[in-house]
Image: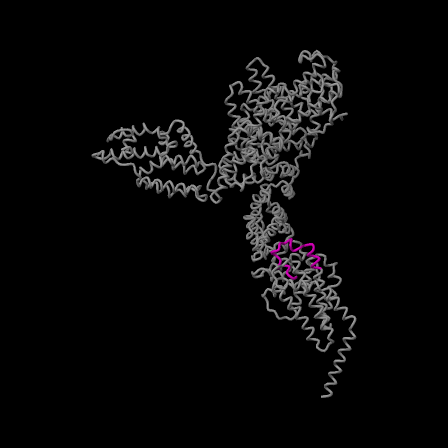
Amino acid sequence: MTNTPWHLLGITPTQDEKLIRDAYFRRLPDHHPEEDPDGFRQLRDAYEAALEFARQTEPDESEAPEVTADPDREAAQQWFDDLCTVSQQPAQRFRIDAYESLFAQLDRLSLTSTTMLAHPTLQWATNHRHLPSAMLQALGGRLGWQEVVTQLSPENAVAVDNFLRDLVRPDPFDLSLLSEWPGAIQEETHWYLGNLAHHCRGNSRSALAAWLNIPLCLPLPKAPEITELLLRSYVLAGEPVPPSLLADAEHVRAQCVDAAEWHWLLAEACHQNGDHSAAWDWLQPLLPQPEAFAPVSADRLMLLFQILGESDPEWMPLAVAALRPTLNGPTDSALALRLVEVETRLLHRQSPAAVAARGCINDLLFPPEDPVEPVAGHFDTAEEIDLPLIYAWLCQLMRSPESIWNLVLDRSRIDAALEHLRARTAFLLRHLLRLADKASLPEQHLGTEGEIPPSREVLLKKLLLNKPTMTNVAFQRLTAKDNPFTDTEPNRSISPLWHWLHCRNQNTVGTWLSELEDEENEAINLACQQLGLMIECASDRLFETGAPALIALVAEKARSPLFRTVAAALQDLLKSPHDLSAIASYCEKLLAPLMEASWPRPLTSLLDSGPIRQSVATALEAPDALSRPEWAAIAGGMLMGSNNNSLEGVCYTLVLSTMTDGPPEPWGRWANNRFLRPDQISLKNNATLAQWLNLAAIADDEAPSGSGLHEDWALYLWAVGRLGRTKDHSTAIFERLAKPLYALFRNPQQWPLQRVLIALLLFQLGYWEAKRFDERHSPRAYGRRYWPLWFGGCLNRKHFIMHITVWFAVATAGMLALPTRPSWVTAAVVLFALPSGLGLIARRLRDTGSRGFGLVTMTILLGSLTPLLSFVTVTILAVLPSRDHRVSVARIQSLLLERLQR
Amino acid sequence: MLAKEQVGWLMALSAPLVALNRNDGAEYDTRAFRPHSTPDASGLKDSWDIADRDDLLETVGNMTDRGHAERFAGEYWQWSSFTLAKRQRIREQHSANDRLIWDFIERSALMTGPGGTRSWDIGRMSFLLRSGYHLGWLDEKECDFLHGQLALRARYWYPSWSHYMQGFMSGLILWRAMGSDDPAETRRLLVDGPADTWVITAYRDLRQNPANPANLHPWHLPLTEQPRPASLPEALLQ
């Protein structure tokens, strides 16, 4: 009876459930689940067995249940084992859906089983805090962990209660991002981020900085939460923020709800990196949002003014206008010295904006009773007007974006003054002009460029250069019909676009272009030029933000179908600037209008831009680059974009074309296109080149063969092409030797053998020149995978076989064509031409480092003997010509004698 | 021998006091603090209890590194070392009065950096040295050498003239606030002190007056190292 539930509970058998429960809770502290799990389990089983016994209608002590294993326990154990299994799977443990089946099973378990599971799962969960909080929270809710807490000892209950409270906090990031990583990396990442978050809440900046410098096995996932945590950590620790993290943060910012907070964070990060201009770029958009400054801390307010002072202090008046509600708070005095610092930076600037900014700072430091009234009063008494101040306000208003404008106008006390000011702008300017004409305005008030009388051009330039990112409204105002500047300078100039290029202000140009309907040709040409430059700036934010809008604008405004096509192609490209297929598509689209229309010079820079070349170079490194037919078009884009006088593009593209399996359709067009006009190619033999291009197509099985010497021509022209690649062909061997030899070769009156020898010499000359070229441009620079390009000086493997065949054919033809010649001629052909050819092949194989050819050893041996064999042969032929001849004559005489005797 | 701009740079260490005493004949770039006044030791005796050269050197030796700034150096160090959350926790632990001081330090530390108000001590010691030179207690070499030792400390604690000057002004306000017997005045100085007219006026002159060598020479102007004159104690400002 010692293991009966009644004994374990310390009571006599009873049907009173309350008595049983009281006994259970009385004994519970003696068997703490963590300190005595077995005892706890026995006590729990006894409690449940006693309850079951008590619920029977006629209890019989003799039938009191023994504490034995039951199905509920086994089911619970099985479920718990499954939970442990899932939680140990790196690919599953952070995915909420992986636990869905377990939760479904939980519904099918009995109440007893789930009760059994409550405590062990809670204990398990405390050791697995890294699992998703949502899952643990749901599990706790289903298994009643809160009730378990009430059964624990006070000290344990506190710890567990803290754990349960902690579960309410969401995960630091989307843990499922780690699912594809190995378990060890998952744990490292989780551990690192957990500690980083802890140190962010901790005390020591140096400890936080140390954590930021810990190297990790893999880069952290690019989740918004992680990016924010890292950025905040760097800012808190005062460490320089890595540029890659800043880029990620900019990308993530768009996905986040609290954009203002991100602006602040990014501004702090840029400021920390010493890039005050970028920091101001982040803070500036916040100015129209008073709510972004309402809860601003003193730290951030100081930061704002510090950044403002170091980047663009002339923005002070508008910043103050935007911050006025905040500045009225108790932090004003803290800003005093900072404002003096800003004022110091403005000290030597005489522009109206600087004057206004200094006035504004002075007002802040020594607040007048009514800062607006004096200004408003000036408008009513124009004769006593404070010209520099008014003009400064005008400049400020013109430079301000619409939102700031509205914001300023919303201010209760400034409303009247500024509204008045806006309404009377024309009057004021006329007044200013009149005063300036009378030279009544002191010189120092005219500004550095003499804006009074305000020249629209000068003002535009000044605005663009001084505040490039906020000039769109200025443009709008300056081009508006009621703008007083318009009358003074009716002819618009396109020079602001250049200023914009320096300033990288896409919005301004967009606005500006929208007003250029009447100046289409010039403007669009220039716009295209800017597009090309913009492409070159592709790594810049401008490329992503400004280019699409600008291109769309060009496409809309341009009447020429060519520009529309180009713009459309560019739009495609810009959607995925690093996507090869998009680049290929862009090139193909671009080719069509190029074929039909004259080549617009401004687009040269577009095609020849760095990012495209970079993309092509990167793509060529890909193992399957040569098997992609679209590369023909890409290379074509490079060719078209490069200097047309260079044959590099031609050769390169043709090699690519012949190496690819795809149809060389573009080449057929290009070969016959005006692109190869004589005036565009400095190499004189344009017809030859054209023929060569055709032969290249023929070699690719696209045209019927059988035109006699095509193979020889191909080889010869290949040598010429190689010569052409040296780019100094006009003064090199080709000009001096190859060309006369070629003329000799073309002469049908020449002796056939002489023609063969000349062909050999030509080839050798071509090879020498090509070798000289290769010494500067080693094939290794292009990677060994491209060895077929250089294989034996041939276009591909088929040409290589053709190459050898031609050599033997030439030698054999020499012998067959000259049966009656003295035998030394045949010997010369065989002994000179064959080793020379093999030696050439051997050197090519050696140069390319090929390992896959069976004859390599033999050809290298023969090749190494080439000079010796050639020398010996020539010596023998030179020394013994008459002897060979005499022998031959004696032989003929003997043959004649034999015939006569018959 | 120091070049003129080097002397000017060293004398700029006490430029804040010149800015505060412009009306009393103080000059920015001369070794003597008030070069056109008659040498009179009574001022030093009354304000500093310095009656002779030995008193002067003793005061400089004692107060350069252990002056008023030391009292709040820990708080400024905490500002630079602790995270925002920790600083907020510390703030909550302070009493209402201490919290005012803490807030002042928090705000001023943004401009002074971890150096805090040490320039308040360095600037005043520079003033004492210049006064001692004017009184004939120190010769040129002694004055320059001791200023060079002050410069080493200033450059250690501050990254720029701006930080140095703001540290001085913050130290001045803090000293006045702590020395005031009137709690209301203490509170006013701690809250609104930096916006006081006299502070802004002095600071404007300090930062914008072209006569101030600090506005002419960069913070990291190379300074020729001076040998320690034999007449000075070895332990002084080592």
Query: Residue A490 lies in magenta, yes or no?
Result: no
Q: Residue A569: horizontal and vertical position, in percent?
A: 56, 52
> Predominant secondary structure in magenta?
helix
Q: Is residue A224 above or below residue B234?
A: below
Decide: is A221 above or below A200. below
From the top left corner, tell me how far across and down residue A421 is, in percent: 58, 30
Question: Along the line of sight, which residue is nearer the eye, A588 or B111?
Answer: B111
Quadrant that contains the C terminus of chain A: bottom right
Which is nearer the eye, A175 or A585?
A175
Residue A338 visible in rendering: no
Above or below A198: residue B122 = above
Q: Is residue A562 above or below residue A391?
A: below
Query: Which colour assignment does the render follow?
Result: one colour
Measuring from the top left, give residue A410's x and y in whole percent. 53, 30
Which residue occupies the foreground of this view, A800 or A3?
Answer: A3
Question: Depth check: A423 or A370 in front?
Answer: A370
**Residue A672 sits in which quadrant?**
bottom right
- Extreme front residue here? A2
Tell me the quarter of the image containing the N terminus of chain A: top left
Q: Quadrant of residue A862?
A: bottom right
* Residue A732 appearing in the image: yes
Instruction: Magenta stretch: give its range.
Output: A769-792
Tell me what residue is drawn at x 27 percent, y 36 percent.
A66
Q: Is residue B193 left or right of residue A735?
A: left
Residue A160 relative to residue A579: left or right:
left
Count numbered badges in the picture. Answer: 0
- From the top left corner, tell me how far across and down residue B88 is, in percent: 52, 25
Is A469 left, or right, of B138 in this rendering?
Answer: left
Q: Per the image, is A790 magenta?
A: yes
Q: Quadrant of residue A18?
A: top left
Task: Point out the residue furthest to the left here.
Answer: A58
